[in-house]
Every structure is written in structure tokens, then in C-alpha cells.
Image (spheres, grey):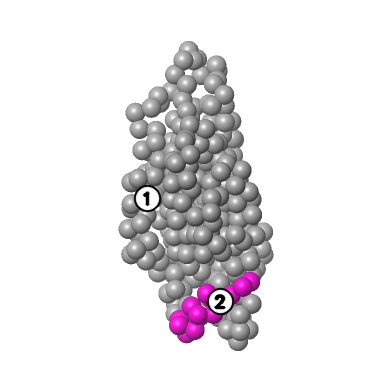
Amino acid sequence: MAISTSRPQARNQSSDDGVARRLLDSSAQLSYDPLTEVDWDTPLDTDFHGASPEWSTLYGTAYWNEMTDAQRKALTRQEAASVASTGIWFEMILQQMVLRDIYAKDPTDDTFQWALTEIADECRHSIMFARGAKKLGAPAYRPHRVAVELGRFFKTVAFGEAAYAAILVAEEVLDVMQRDWMRDERVVPFVRTINNIHVVEESRHMKFARDETRKHLARAGRLRRRIHAVLIAVAAYVIVTSMVNRKVYANAGLDEERAVREAKANEHHKSMMRASCSGLMEFLSSVGLLTRPALFFYRRAHLI
């Protein structure tokens, strides 16, 4: 992060600090406490979906057409819980990267204070997702061990634009699908509230991630850009392919092997993912991070 240390008073903003100040003001005006905003007490109504059915990994497949309405709803509840669990996993990575980035920097700067505000948001979101997954009747879905170890490596080595662009990738993908879920009356009300909270607060995080990515890239050489472009793409691939755990199918009462097979071949879901990432891909292209090697991983993840 570029931080000004020359201003004598907070009101004498540097241009780098202006975005952070606006985000702090926005957070002060519009933030939520999930513990009081979400209806945690009403028992789960199984007549509702957990996510918009069009976002199900099986929607549009032969298996989906054979499923009963109750099975479809059970599946979307498990899938929503899996997405939430993946969100927790990445939010823990995000927090560590941001903390490392601001370590030993000027705590009086708005950028430093916004970074801590974002971390506080992510802590609340993780608790919210955890409680939401439990209420959906799902187990603790965890990414595959390889993904966990890759995440451990990434959070250790990623810095600058690699860290912030990867944060943006994870948040953008979730943002589009959750905007659909929060407006969908077929989705159980407490999940709609969770999605609304996340969309509102993550919009500030995405603004900050875009700004930080641009600022760091302004100081990056050609080789660093090319290396980080691939690192970000690999992170995107791991995140996206970890969103829906294969165990969701068995936990929804389905044939796991058949469901996995049909989900992998589901062109409808692939097109939904590509559409959700169109704005993200435009941004990555505009800052020079959509290189040919990086495109390989985005295509494998069906993001482009």
C-alpha cells in the first residue's frame, strides 16, 4: 500500500489515502452486525432453497431433471453451505495477507485504518458464514488437502498486486452469485439476509482491492507482472474449483459419483461462471494481468 507520512493532519489527504477515507466513511454509515441482523432463531424451513437453483452445479443436467423438488432444495442448501465454508477458508487467507501488508506501517493513515476495518468485517463474515452453514444442516466442508496447502503457500509468498488481485478474484465471483441469491424469494430468508450483508460490505473491499492492485502494479516491472499474473490465475483456479465440495451430493441424498460426473460436464454452470467473471476479466486485462499463461488457468476454471 502507498501510504503518505508527510501530512500533519488527517484532513490533508494524499491522493493514495482518499479512497481509504471514503471507504471508512461509508463503513461508518452502512455496516451490519450479523448477530442481530440475521434471524438465527427461526427453525430452518426446508420448503426453501439455499441458493438460486440456476446456480446449482447440477441445474440443467439430466440428473437435475430426475430429482424431486425436495432433493433440489436439499442440494442447493448443501451447495450454499459449501460456498460459505470456502468463503471462510479464503477470508482467513485474506486477513493474513492484509495484516502482513500493513505490518509496521503508519497506523494514523486512513489506509492502515481501513485495512483493519476490512479485517474486522471479514471476521464477522466468517462467523456469519459458519453459523449459516450450520443452520442449513451442513457439515464442515473443507477444501481438499492440496488446496489447503496451496493456500498456505500462497498466503506466505503473495504480496502487493498478487495478494490484492487474488482477493478481488474471490470476492468478485461470490458477489455476482450472491446478488442473485439475495433477491430470490425461493431462497430461505436468513440466507438472503446473509448474502445482502456480504454484498454491501464486500463492495467496499472490492473497491479497495482494485485500487491497491493498480497502485502496486504502477511500481512493478515486466517480469514481476508476468509471474504474479500466473500466481493470481492459479489462486483463482484453486478457489473456484474448491467452492462446491463433492460431498454435498451424498449429503443431499444423491449418487455422488454420478453427480460429480454430470456437474463437471454441465455447460450451463460453466456459462454462469463465465458471465459472473466478465467484469473481473476486463479489469485484469486492463492492468496487464491477463497474460497467455494466466489464461490457461482461467479457462480451466471456466472463468473465461
Classify residue 28 as left or right of residue 109. Answer: right
In the rendered view of the protein, which quadrant contains the C terminus?
bottom right
Dot 2 corresponds to which residue? 265
Task: Inspect this view and state whether residue 197 appears.
Answer: no
Residue 195 locus on image (x, y percent): 57, 55
| Mark 2 neighbour density, 10 Å: few (under 14) some (14–19) many (20 or more) | few
Residue 94 locus on image (x, y percent): 42, 46
Considering the whole magenta stretch, tell me its main secondary structure. helix
> Is 195 drawn above or below residue 206 in the view shown?
below
SS at circle 2: loop
Circle 2: residue type: Ala
> Is 182 drawn above or below residue 249 in the view shown?
above
Q: Which of 183 and 90 is in front in this view?
A: 90
Dot 1 corresponds to which residue? 154
Residue at the image position 66 percent from the left and 63 percent from the top: 184
Q: Residue 81 carries which label?
A: none
Task: Inspect this view and state whether residue 29 appears.
Answer: yes
Q: Give the range drawn in magenta.
A: 254-268
Circle 1: residue type: Phe
Q: Inspect the magenta stretch and tell me whether residue 62 lies in it.
A: no
> Is 82 drawn above or below residue 289 in the view shown?
below
